[in-house]
């Protein structure tokens, strides 16, 4: 209900000023993983246009791009000392949590967007953690922020508030780095255009990270023919060991 | 193209390699290097080296199910070349190995079942750390004490008796005696089968070959002579790792053949040098060095249990089988 009112309010305030729409694209629709894959950099381009041809789009605009990777179930655990031994004693599960999450913006999130806009799309990583924890209690918040810290340390969560560069009043470019251990699967880049801290347009592009060639063959074989795959591994091991024995025979 | 340029090209192309099951890329030379270092030790001592390699890989960022499952392939390969070189030197008791292999295969199946049970109960990590610490600590202390006693005796001029051939423990006299010609033993088959079962169970549970337990068990419990103990142990490790690799490929589907192959290439080469180096050391010296290594890993696990962790928080991916 609140969201509906908010949307209504947005339409009322934004529409008279001129309706903007977003044209955007991503540099690589399919990121192909080959044997030498070591992470990659993607570019995202876009232009804010007016939907009414007579009136040109009028800035200044701000842009927030949220890139979400395939969802996974994760747990965050805390070690505590019990009877002199450090063990995992507490844990919080995060269901359907993004394996990759990047927020790239043209300015500080709090400066360029109203808190209501940020909250409506759960843009801040902390919001993602609370959604995945299905809870807003203190424990979920604490473990959620620690999980985000761990993901950030590994390069899977990124917040870059100077990452979107405007080439003109309306055209922008942004870059995002996918780490070498990025999860395979569908990714979504959701772009929000802001004016006077309110959303005026939005758009989404999907892209995929996918193994190709030999890497894909190995992965598919391990899932579809596990027995054969295991036997091949064993034969490879025995063969390698035997070959080394022959080569090094003195 | 000049040779230098070609070398540079190869280095640039091959330095990172993508592991399709682990879904990350690693440095090729690092993988071959740790494979080689652990392979050297495996050839030298006749142990698989899994108890070193698995923690090393996990520490390097490989997800633990992938590390455990892929190391079994590498251990099989490194032990194969070791076992072959012992076979050529006539250092394997095939008869004894057959009994060990059969019983440890049954043990491994029980171990895989216990593994899933513990996983569903939670605290698998703690169980593994404590088991590593207790098992390695116990075996390491025993081996070290024995080796030091032998070394000290040798130094003080007392010629150590060859205990292996004539001494009999109570467990040798149990029923169902069998003659193992190569080992010059006429002993009950029951302790042989029990040892095999236990090694198989522990190996599958902890993701190790179990050579470092099997070698002392054969030496101290069964009195297998030193000239066949390492070769027989290696053959048993090869067989058990082959069974475990197939079981892992079927159940957890986390055997990374690319990772395993990189480790194998390093491991098999290292194992050759290890087996050659082993010829220049006496049995008691070898056992003392292995004891040091085993104790070192035990202390490492022990410290991790009692020292405050650098980061009290950790995260894990939840796979269909449970949290890793």
Image: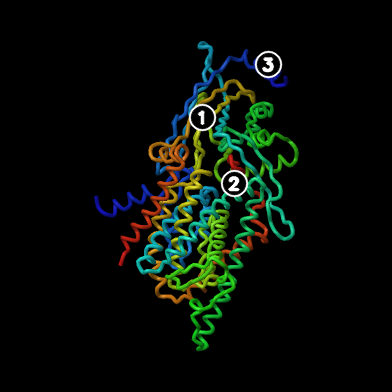
x and y, in percent, of residue A28 in the image: 44, 31
Residue A55 vs residue B242, the one in the foreground: B242
Circle 3 Cα neighbour tier, 10 Å, few/some/many (<14 / 14–19 / ≥20): few
Instruction: Judge whether residue A161 can be spotted in this image.
Output: no
- Chain letter behind tag 2: B
Numbered mark located on residue A8 in the image: 3
Is B204 situated above or below B192? above
x and y, in percent, of residue B75 in the image: 46, 57
Residue found 59% across the figure and 33% down from its top:
A107
Is B317 situated above or below B205? above
Circle 2 Cα neighbour tier, 10 Å, few/some/many (<14 / 14–19 / ≥20): some
Q: How is the image coloured?
A: rainbow
Q: CA distance from mark 1 to mark 2?
A: 44 Å
x and y, in percent, of residue B174 in the image: 57, 68
Pointer 2 residue: B324
x and y, in percent, of residue A49 in the image: 51, 18
Residue found 56% across the figure and 30% down from its top:
A65
Is A119 situated above or below B171? above
Pointer 1 residue: A166
Residue A70 vs residue A178, the one in the foreground: A70
Instruction: Judge whether residue A3 can be spotted in this image.
Output: yes
Q: CA distance from mark 2 to mark 3?
A: 46 Å
SS for callout 1: strand
Which circle's residue, 3 or 1, is located before the other in the chain?
3
């Amino acid at each position: 209900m609140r969201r509906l009112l908010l949307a209504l309010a947005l339409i009322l305030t934004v529409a008279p000023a001129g309706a903007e729409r977003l044209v955007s694209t991503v540099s690589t629709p399919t990121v192909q993983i080959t044997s030498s894959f070591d992470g990659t950099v993607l570019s995202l381009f876009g232009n804010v246009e007016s939907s009414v041809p007579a009136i040109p789009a009028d800035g200044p605009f701000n842009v927030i791009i949220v890139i979400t990777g395939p969802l996974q179930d994760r747990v965050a655990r805390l070690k505590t000392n019990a009877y002199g031994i450090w063990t995992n004693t507490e844990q919080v599960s995060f269901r359907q949590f993004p394996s990759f999450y990047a927020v790239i913006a043209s300015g500080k999130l709090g400066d360029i967007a109203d808190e209501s806009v940020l909250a409506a799309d759960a843009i801040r990583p902390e919001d993602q953690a609370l959604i995945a924890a299905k809870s807003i209690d203190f424990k979920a918040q604490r473990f959620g922020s620690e999980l985000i810290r761990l993901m950030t340390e590994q390069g899977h969560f990124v917040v870059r508030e100077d990452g979107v560069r405007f080439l003109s009043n309306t055209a922008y470019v942004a870059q995002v780095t996918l780490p070498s251990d990025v999860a395979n699967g569908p990714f979504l880049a959701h772009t929000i255009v802001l004016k006077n801290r309110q959303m005026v347009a939005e758009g989404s592009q999907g892209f995929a990270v996918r193994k190709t060639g030999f890497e894909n063959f190995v992965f598919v074989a391990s899932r579809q023919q596990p027995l054969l795959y295991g036997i091949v591994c064993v034969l490879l091991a025995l063969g390698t060991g035997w070959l080394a024995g022959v080569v090094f025979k003195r | 193209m000049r040779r230098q340029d070609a070398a540079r090209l190869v280095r640039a192309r091959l330095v990172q390699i993508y592991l399709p099951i682990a879904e990350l890329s690693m440095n090729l030379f690092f993988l071959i290097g740790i494979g080689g270092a652990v392979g050297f030790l495996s050839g030298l001592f006749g142990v698989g080296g899994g108890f070193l390699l698995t923690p090393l890989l996990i520490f390097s960022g490989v997800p633990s199910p992938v590390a455990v499952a892929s190391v079994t392939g590498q251990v099989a390969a490194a032990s194969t070349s070791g076992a072959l070189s012992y076979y050529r030197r006539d250092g394997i008791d095939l008869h004894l190995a057959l009994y060990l292999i059969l019983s440890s295969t049954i043990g491994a199946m029980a171990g895989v079942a216990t593994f899933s049970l513990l996983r569903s109960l939670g605290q698998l990590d703690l169980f593994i750390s404590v088991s590593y610490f207790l098992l390695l600590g116990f075996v390491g202390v025993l081996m070290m004490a024995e080796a030091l006693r032998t070394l000290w005796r040798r130094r003080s001029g007392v010629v150590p008796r060859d205990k292996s051939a004539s001494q009999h423990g109570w467990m040798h006299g149990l029923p169902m005696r069998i003659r193992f010609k190569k080992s010059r033993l006429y002993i009950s088959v029951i302790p042989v089968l029990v040892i095999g079962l236990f090694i198989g169970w522990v190996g599958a549970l902890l993701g190790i070959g179990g050579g470092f337990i099997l070698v002392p068990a054969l030496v101290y419990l069964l009195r297998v002579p030193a000239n066949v103990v390492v070769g027989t142990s290696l053959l048993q490790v090869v067989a058990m790792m082959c069974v475990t690799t197939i079981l892992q490929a079927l159940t957890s589907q986390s055997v990374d053949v690319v990772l395993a192959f990189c480790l194998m290439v390093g491991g098999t080469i290292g194992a050759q040098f290890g087996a050659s180096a082993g010829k220049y050391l006496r049995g008691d010296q070898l056992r003392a060095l292995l004891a040091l290594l085993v104790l070192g890993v035990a202390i490492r696990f022990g410290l991790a249990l009692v020292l405050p962790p650098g980061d009290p928080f950790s995260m894990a991916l939840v796979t269909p089988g449970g949290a890793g």
